[in-house]
Amino acid sequence: MEIGIVHTFYRPENLGQSGESHPVIIWGNGTGAVPGVYSSLLRHWASQGFIVAAANTPTSNYAISMRLGIDVLEQRNADSSSPYYHKVDLAHIGSAGHSQGGAAAINAAIDPRVITAVPIQPGPLTDPDLMDEPVFYLAGQQDHIVWPAWVKAMYQDSDHVPAVYGEVRGAGHLDSIGDGGDFRAPATAWFRYWLMGDEAAGRMFFGPDCGYCADTALWSGWERNAAALQLSGPTA
């Protein structure tokens, strides 16, 4: 982990050890929060092979700092003196965030460098019509701050892109902080699919026998829109 003024970076322990480059997740915090609140989740993503650029701002809504994280990694990837030199997969970048940061994940996906988004219990200050990337909306069944109906409305407004809606059974608004709780595994699988081309992860969401579709223990609500139903495997 590397804590800077604008960003906190989480990276794989063996960065580029086998000559590979690592896809990127840019992260937005909930209102008043900092990346440390979500540290276990962000460290988990780093352990999965992602570089995470988490904006330090407690007001992430407009995604300015999130998108700046891509700029920083572009510079480091081109800098021969940087440990990130030629180790950042800039063609595979996803955005994610919680609450206000969930709305910011959608706003960040307006950037053409971002190819997918995972808004976790996203706040209202965003417009899904502005993004053109596949999106996985996560809501909490017992979230009384960001009601599931609000998140589902965003999902329904995303009929122009492949979109999936997952409502975590029994989850409240703060259940996604720390290690991500029951939000962590599906969010990780989504990113492994879109950013790494992981076929097993893709089968959790797409195709006639998708793994998450029948998981009523995890989900109190689950939907895939028409564009998502047309997908049967990784496209990354």
Image: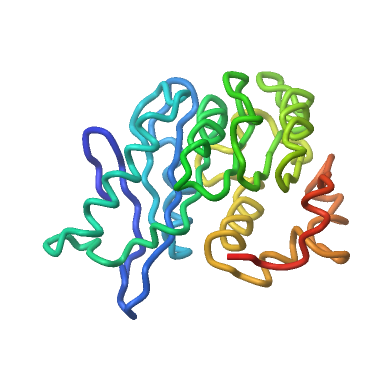
The image quarter in which residue 161 lies: top right
Q: How many marks?
A: 0
Q: Nearer the viewer, residue 42 or 202?
A: 202
Measured as percent of width and height from the top left, residue 233 is found at 72, 68
Looking at the image, is 86 positioned above or below residue 115?
below
Measured as percent of width and height from the top left, residue 206 is found at 77, 61
Q: Nearer the viewer, residue 181 or 122?
A: 122
The image quarter in which residue 22 lies: bottom left
With 3 as the anchor, is 32 left or right in this view?
Answer: right
Looking at the image, is 228 positioned above or below residue 132?
below
The image quarter in which residue 118 lies: top right
The residue sitting at 28% across, 52% down in the picture is 74
Looking at the image, is 23 positioned above or below residue 39?
below
With 181 as the anchor, is 61 left or right in this view?
Answer: left
With 168 as the anchor, is 67 left or right in this view?
Answer: left
Residue found at the far left of this picture: 81
Q: Which quarter of the rendered picture does the C terminus lie within?
A: bottom right
The residue sitting at 14% across, 64% down in the picture is 80
The residue sitting at 43% across, 30% down in the picture is 63
Specify how the rendered protein is coloured. rainbow
Measured as percent of width and height from the top left, residue 124 is found at 62, 20
Measured as percent of width and height from the top left, residue 228 is found at 77, 52
Q: Nearer the viewer, residue 233 or 120?
A: 233
